């Protein structure tokens, strides 16, 4: 195959289209990253020019190549305190609203989906313990779900690499982790605090028991779904939230492109989406 | 106070939404007074292709936008010719919101829309033709460019052509070049057509 290159026009055309379809915006500084992955995909699909690849990407009925490209253009990496501005938003903006309108002393319910290997739910638990002054006034229920049972097993075990805990402040690391050689295990108190469950968001029977959540963290999942599945998942999560409940997506995801059911909420720390208070 | 755990997958006495028995039960729930129950019913009906007529009937009457959205997603999931025909009918509805929602649903059905695109693009109503061009905007189908070329070559309504030429600016290849030049001659007195066609020609030349 002849040498393939991506021209400035190709890059701009691709960037505009990819942004429109996924909400992911590549700055000019990411040019090398984007070009490299585009060329890899063009070679893998035997496309000899950017135009032929772009036409396939745009018009392939199955959308399979677009999905593959999304997968390679996004870094599927999870670690403790990833995008922790949303956790700050939880304790400073969302929880005060939730508490203010709560009419009973029932628990505050948080759902993390996908759970992956547990870094996110454990990070939330640590944030609540360390940064939320009202932690002793409320019961908190954190449920963390994933379709993959092997990853749930890892989450329950709570053993992590140094890379995974790299962003954890030293004081938290000492307080909530136990070092075993080259790995870190989350303390038993936190391991016992989170309910890990298997759920398939696309299966109504699986999801129906999940309801009355005050906050759902659904970060970097919908981006991997096709358009219809993404919409279906957003609608399903809508029914798992209490009226006024919040959903947090990944930084490159936008509910506005998926469903009109939610209201956008611009808090000082983060943009999140809310099920309308008057929703039935 | 602190962290608590409940077994979420255990039967919950508070759960009102019991596992539906099947099509007839779901169809009954679609008429429930509770929008949440109607949403769950519409979601569950995705497994029942025979539910298209009742879903379309409910779609026309449904006042709650959240239920409507789930019904449209279910119709998209079912994706049969009958479902597509029902979505096409929504393009003629007086409710602009419903029209737009139906268009979004149809964009997700390239294989099902392809056989009827030619007919839609020749509809007697120019508004329906514009909406049909809008469907092409996100339709993943290799025929998009040739449909657009047909539109700019044959449609007499300047607004339909303007919508099509905008899209050709993005997806057009050298195959669209001659048609764009013909369009410029056909609408020589329309500044927007001149502008949009030049833009598309420029982009194609640089590609």
Image (tube, grey):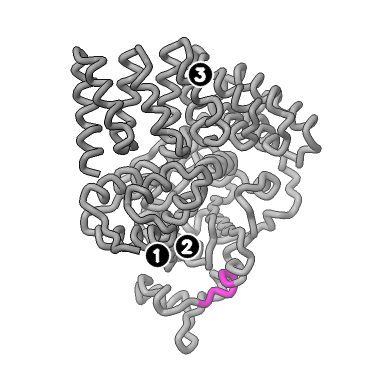
- Give the label on residue A256, or none: none
Q: Which chain is disc 2 placed on?
A: A
Q: Distance between the residues labelled 1 and 3?
A: 47 Å
Helix, strand or loop: magenta stretch: helix
Q: What stretch is highlighted in magenta?
A: A154-159
Image side of residue B93 versus residue A51, left or right = right
Q: Can residue B21 be seen in this view?
A: yes
Image side of residue A72 versus residue A190, left or right = left
Q: Name the residue under label 1.
A: A81
Q: In which quarter of the image is the N terminus of chain B?
A: bottom right
Kind of element beneath mark 3: loop
- Give the label on residue B91, or none: 3
Q: Quadrant of the C terminus of chain B?
A: top left
Q: Can residue A218 be seen in this view?
A: no
Q: Is residue A228 above or below residue A79?
A: above
Q: Tell me what residue is drawn at x 44 percent, y 49 percent.
A: A248
């Amino acid at each position: 195959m002849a040498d393939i290159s991506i021209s400035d026009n190709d890059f701009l055309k691709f960037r505009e289209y990819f942004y429109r379809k996924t909400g992911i915006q590549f700055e000019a500084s990411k040019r090398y990253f984007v070009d490299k992955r585009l060329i890899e995909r063009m070679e893998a699909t035997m496309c000899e020019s950017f135009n032929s690849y772009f036409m396939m990407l745009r018009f392939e009925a199955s959308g399979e190549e677009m999905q593959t490209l999304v997968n390679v253009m996004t870094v599927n990496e999870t670690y403790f305190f990833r995008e922790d501005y949303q956790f700050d938003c939880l304790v400073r903006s969302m929880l005060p609203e939730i508490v203010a309108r709560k009419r009973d002393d029932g628990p505050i319910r948080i759902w993390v989906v996908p759970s992956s290997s547990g870094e996110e739910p454990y990070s939330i638990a640590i944030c609540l313990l360390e940064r939320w002054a009202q932690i002793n006034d409320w019961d908190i229920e954190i449920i963390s779900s994933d379709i993959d049972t092997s990853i749930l097993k890892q989450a329950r075990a709570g053993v992590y690499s140094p890379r995974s805990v790299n962003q954890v402040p030293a004081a938290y690391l000492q307080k909530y982790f136990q070092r075993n050689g080259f790995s870190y295990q989350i303390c038993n108190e936190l391991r016992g605090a989170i309910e890990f469950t298997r759920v398939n968001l696309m299966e109504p029977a699986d999801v129906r028991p999940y309801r009355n959540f005050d906050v759902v963290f659904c970060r970097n999942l919908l981006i991997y779904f096709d358009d219809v599945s993404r919409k279906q998942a957003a609608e399903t999560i809508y029914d798992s939230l209490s009226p006024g409940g919040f959903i947090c997506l990944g930084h490159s995801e936008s509910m506005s492109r998926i469903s009109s059911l939610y209201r956008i909420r611009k808090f000082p720390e983060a943009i999140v989406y809310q099920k309308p208070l008057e929703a039935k | 106070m602190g962290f608590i755990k409940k077994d979420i997958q255990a039967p919950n006495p508070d759960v009102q939404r019991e596992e539906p028995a099947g099509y007839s039960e779901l169809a009954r729930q679609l008429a429930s007074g509770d929008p949440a129950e109607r949403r769950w019913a519409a979601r569950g009906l995705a497994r029942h292709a025979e539910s298209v007529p009742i879903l379309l009937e409910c779609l026309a009457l449904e006042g709650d936008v959240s239920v409507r959205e789930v019904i449209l997603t279910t119709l998209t999931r079912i994706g049969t010719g009958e479902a597509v025909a029902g979505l096409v009918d929504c393009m003629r509805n007086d409710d602009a919101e419903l029209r737009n929602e139906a268009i979004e649903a149809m964009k997700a059905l390239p294989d099902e829309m392809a056989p009827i695109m030619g007919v839609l693009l020749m509809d007697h109503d120019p508004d329906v033709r514009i909406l049909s061009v809008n469907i092409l905007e996100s339709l993943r189908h290799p025929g998009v460019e040739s449909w657009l070329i047909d539109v700019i070559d044959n449609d007499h309504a300047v607004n339909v052509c303007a919508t099509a030429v905008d899209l050709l600016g993005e997806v057009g290849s050298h195959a669209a070049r001659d048609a764009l030049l013909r369009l410029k001659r056909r609408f020589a007195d329309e500044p927007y057509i001149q502008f949009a066609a030049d833009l598309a020609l420029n982009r194609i030349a640089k590609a």
